[in-house]
Amino acid sequence: MGTQAPPTPPESYDIRSKSEKEKNVDDWLPITSSRNAKWWYSTFHNVTVMVGAGVLSLPSAMSELGWGPGIAILILPWIITLYTLWQMVEMHEMVPGKRFDRYHELGQEAFGEKLGLWIVVPQQLVVEVSVNIVYMVTGGQSLKKFHDLVCPDCKHIKQTYFIMIFASVHFVLSQLPNFNSISGVSLAAAVMSLSYSTIAWGASVEKGKKENVEYGYPSSSTAGTVFGFLSALGEVAFAYAGHNVVLEIQATIPSTPEKPSKKPMWKGVVVAYIIVALCYFPVALIGYWAFGNSVQDNILLSLEKPTWLIAMANMMVVVHVIGSYQIYAMPVFDMLETMLVKRLYFSPGLMLRLIARSVYVALTMFIAITFPFFSGLLGFFGGLVFAPTTYFLPCVMWLAIYKPKVGSLSWFTNWVCIILGFLLMILAPIGGLRQIILDAKTYKFYS
């Protein structure tokens, strides 16, 4: 049968025949430099990634969807995305002796060396960069809200400056080398997400149902209702979007043939999804119950009192999106540094990292300052790029790699997810784009 492949070293699944130079580069790159994470790292990284700006917009999304469709659309993505996330965790080590540490590496296995890159990398980059832009906006908005609540008589400060203040933190934190080095930031972020979600629904219960509350669709026109419904679909899609960094998170967990990383990773994912449900469902349902169709696109903006509690919740949002920004930025840093070192032959080192990452943070800050349309951005990006990478690309890769029997449960389930995800990708951005256009009419640049 020819020469046998050398046995896989017991300490790792990931040792391949590489030159010393290539191995040194891999040891320097953020995704592959550290593999000593525990299963609970997966929990708080996934909570931090998913429970972000999206949770605060869920009551607003409910107002555009209505009670029946709203509840169904909250539950269905929770089930579908848990299933597609399980597929990605399973596929991480489907080839013995090899780990797919990056989303695009799995894409290359499914679609071929070149096509896999072209299918996955643009989508993944758009997802991660767009999330970072939206989180810049969210961080700036929450800082401004905190300032206005704590000091209502102080001089008015533009939101632009608050986005700059938020960005300044990232110029420092972006220099942390890899996922494990940001685990403390991520843990704090995960705790904050559960805390401010609890404050959001708890304060809504305390406030009680608003006087003359209405649950009908907020728009008086049919067109406005339809577009609002589509935009809300995108906002809900955005709320379940941890898939873009899941393989990169799993890459940090040690793995051997006897103890593959998929077991601790899946354990962490299940706990994360329970926490996500505890954050999302109460906020969406109680927030909508309390304010009806007059709820603002960020539930904390609708809650004015008690002032100290809402101010504290806004600071929790700031801490949380600091962690979320870093987790979504890490794969971008990995791609950027891989290109600079492996393609353009720059020497890996502190100066390269400092310049490359600082330029990226500055770029996301500039775009956030220029286009801070919170709700519209969620709807547009949620539909356009989260639907493929979260809802149906994992299913397409599963079909391409495992080739389940036509008509089997696996085949049928994957095709249902692909069709629903494709419809979401087409429909949701329409509503989001309309919302951005409407916001832009009344918006003054750099206000």
Image: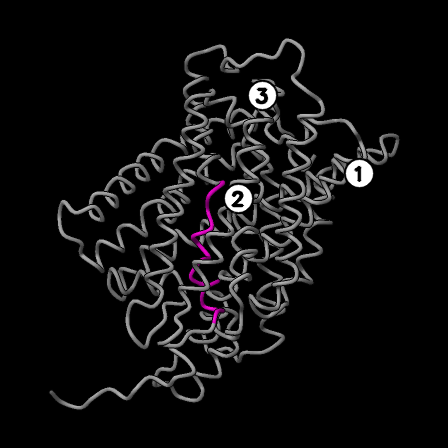
Q: Position of residue 404 (x, y in %)?
A: 18, 54
Q: Residue at x 43, y 40 (%)?
A: 78
Above-or-below relation of 11 to 373: below
**Left or right of 164 on screen, residue 384:** left
Determine crowd level at label 1: few under 14, some 14-19, many 20+ residues with C-alpha closer than 10 A: some
Residue assigned mark 3: 289
Considering the numbered disc 1 on the image, is that residue within a helix, a strand or a loop? helix
The image quadrant that residue 424 belongs to is top left
First of labels 3, 2 by sequence position: 2
Left or right: 118, with 265 as reference point:
left
Q: Would you say the residues marked 1 and 2 are in contact, meaning their CB atoms lie under 8 Å apart? A: no
Q: Quadrant of residue 297?
A: top right
**Disc 3 from disc 1: Cα separation:** 28 Å
The amino acid at mark 1 is His
Is 409 positioned to the left or the right of 192 in the image?
left
Q: Which mark is residue 276?
A: 2
Q: CA distance from mark 3 to mark 2?
A: 20 Å
Q: Nearer the viewer, residue 111 or 167?
A: 111
Residue in the foreground of this view, choosing between 52 and 73: 73
Image coordinates for residue 132, horizontal then vertical, percent: 56, 50
Give me the residue at 70% from left, 29% from top: 203
Q: Is residue 58 magenta?
A: no
Q: Residue at x 51, y 52 (%)?
A: 271
Residue 60, given in percent of the width and then of the height, sits at 55, 26
Q: Secondary structure at mark 2?
A: helix
- How many discs mark residues in the rendered view? 3
From the viewer's side, name the closer residue of 2 and 376: 2
Task: Say whether marks 3 and 2 touch (CB < 8 Å).
Answer: no
Which segment did they paint magenta? 239-253
Q: Earlier in the sequence, mark 1 or mark 2?
A: 1
